[in-house]
Amino acid sequence: MSSAIGALIGIIFVIVIVGVVWWAIQQLLPLIPLAEPFLTIVRVLMVVVLVLIVLWIIIVLLGVAGIHVPSPFH
C-alpha cells in the first residue's frame, strides 16, 4: 500500500515539474523568431514529446508500485 502512495506522490511531482517546464517553454518560445507554420510545428512537437515523457514516467512509477501496465515503449 505504501508503494502505491509513493507512486501517486511521484506522479503528482512529475506532473508539477512538467507543468513548470511547459510554462517556461511557452514563455520563452515567443522570443525565438519563427514563421507561423514552424511555430505551430514546434508547439505540436512539444506537446507530443511532453505527453510521451509523462506517460513513460507514470508507467515506470506504477511498475515500481507493483501495478504492471503493458508498456508500448519497449
Image (spheres, rainbow, N blue to C red):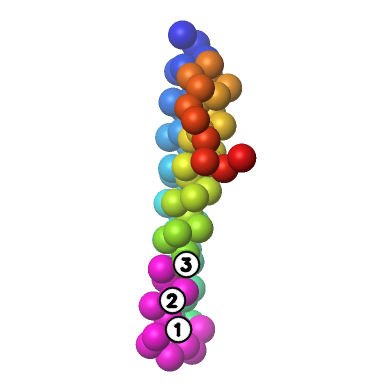
State the residue at coordinates (47%, 74%): 42
**Residue 45 bears which disc, if any?**
3
Labelled pair 2, 1 in contact (Cβ < 8 Å):
yes
Residue 27 appears in view: no
**Residue 36 figure quarter:** bottom left
66 sits left or right of 37 in the view: right
In front here: 50 or 27?
50
Q: Residues within 10 Å of mark 3 (few under 14, many from 20)?
A: few
State the residue at coordinates (52%, 41%): 72
- Whichever of labels 3 and 1 marks the residue nearer the N terminus, that label is 1
- From this view, report whether residue 56 is shown above or below residue 61: below
Q: Which residue is mark 2?
A: 41
Position of the C terminus, as image quadrant, is top right
The CA span between labels 2 and 3 is 6 Å
Q: Which residue is mark 1?
A: 38
22 sits left or right of 61 in the view: left
Percent of width and height locating residue 67: 48, 19
Where are the magenta residues, as a range?
Answer: 32-44
Percent of width and height locating residue 64: 58, 22
- From this view, report whether residue 44 is shown above or below residue 7: below
Label 1 SS: helix
Label 3 SS: helix
State the residue at coordinates (57%, 43%): 73
**Residue 53 bears which disc, if any?**
none
Q: Residues within 10 Å of mark 1 (few under 14, many from 20)?
A: few
Q: Amino acid at mark 2?
A: Ile
Label 2 SS: helix
In reply to whether residue 39 is colored magenta, the answer given is yes
Q: How many marks?
A: 3
Determine the main secondary structure of the stretch shown in magenta: helix
- From this view, report whether residue 34 is shown above or below residue 27: below
